[in-house]
Amino acid sequence: QVQLLASGGGLVQAGRSLRLPCATSGLTLSSYAMGWFRQAPGEEREFVAAITRSGINTYYADSVKGRFTISRDNAKNTVYLQMNSLKPEDTAAYYCNADWYRNRDFKVVPGAYWGLGTQVTVSS
């Protein structure tokens, strides 16, 4: 079955960087659009970043644009989220997602496949 395993979270100071890998199995990664979402305590899960199957196109939430970079290595069955200049408001559990799509409003809608989250905590 499809498995998505996000890792790399931790406690970091504001301004520092983290890289989150999402290791996948049970799917042909090149066939799936991949994304990252996050959920802070008491908040709804929100879109962070997405990358198309080819890797040519990427999309970002306004709150992370210019600081986060999503990438993929289909040969390694892994998707990455590079997070730079972290802020306390980036504190959340981060989830890897497969098979997202864009609705008629061009909003990224998560697909059916979710991995377990990895916690990122940014201290001020």
Image (tube, helix red, strand yellow):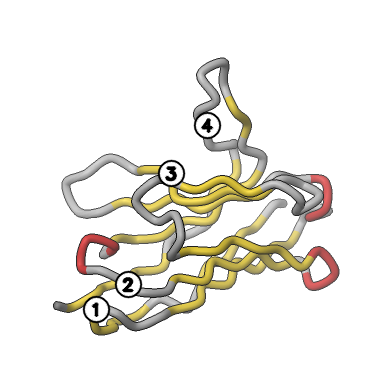
CB contact under 8 Å: marks 1 and 2: yes
Q: Secondary structure at mark 4?
A: strand
Seen in the image, is 14 located left or right of residue 114? left
Mark earlier in primary sequence (1, 4): 1
- The Cα–Cα distance between marks 2 and 3, rounded to whole angstroms, is 17 Å
Which of the two marks, 3 or 1, is nearer to us in this view? 1
Q: Residues within 10 Å of mark 4 (few under 14, many from 20)?
A: some
Relative to 32, is 8 above or below? Answer: below
Which of the pair 123/10 is nearer the observer?
A: 123
At label 2, which amino acid type do we have?
Leu
CB contact under 8 Å: marks 3 and 1: no
Where on the picture, by quarter, is residue 119?
Answer: bottom left
Q: Position of residue 117 (x, y in %)?
A: 43, 61
Q: Which mark is residue 30?
A: none
- The Cα–Cα distance between marks 1 and 2, rounded to whole angstroms, is 5 Å
| Residue at x 58% of width, y 72% of height | 21
Relative to 52, is 87 above or below? Answer: below
Q: Which residue position holds label 3?
A: 47
At label 1, which amino acid type do we have?
Ala
- The Cα–Cα distance between marks 4 and 3, rounded to whole angstroms, is 8 Å
Q: Residues within 10 Å of mark 2 (few under 14, many from 20)?
A: many
Where on the picture, by quarter, is residue 102?
Answer: top right
Mark earlier in primary sequence (1, 2): 1
| Residue at x 29% of width, y 61% of height | 92
Q: Which residue position holds label 1?
A: 14
Which of the two marks, 2 or 4, is nearer to us in this view? 2
Which of the pair 122/59 is nearer the observer?
A: 59
At label 3, which amino acid type do we have?
Phe
| Residue at x 77% of width, y 56% of height | 26
- Quadrant of the drawing holding the C terminus: bottom left
Where on the picture, by quarter, is residue 86?
Answer: bottom left
Q: Which residue position holds label 2?
A: 86
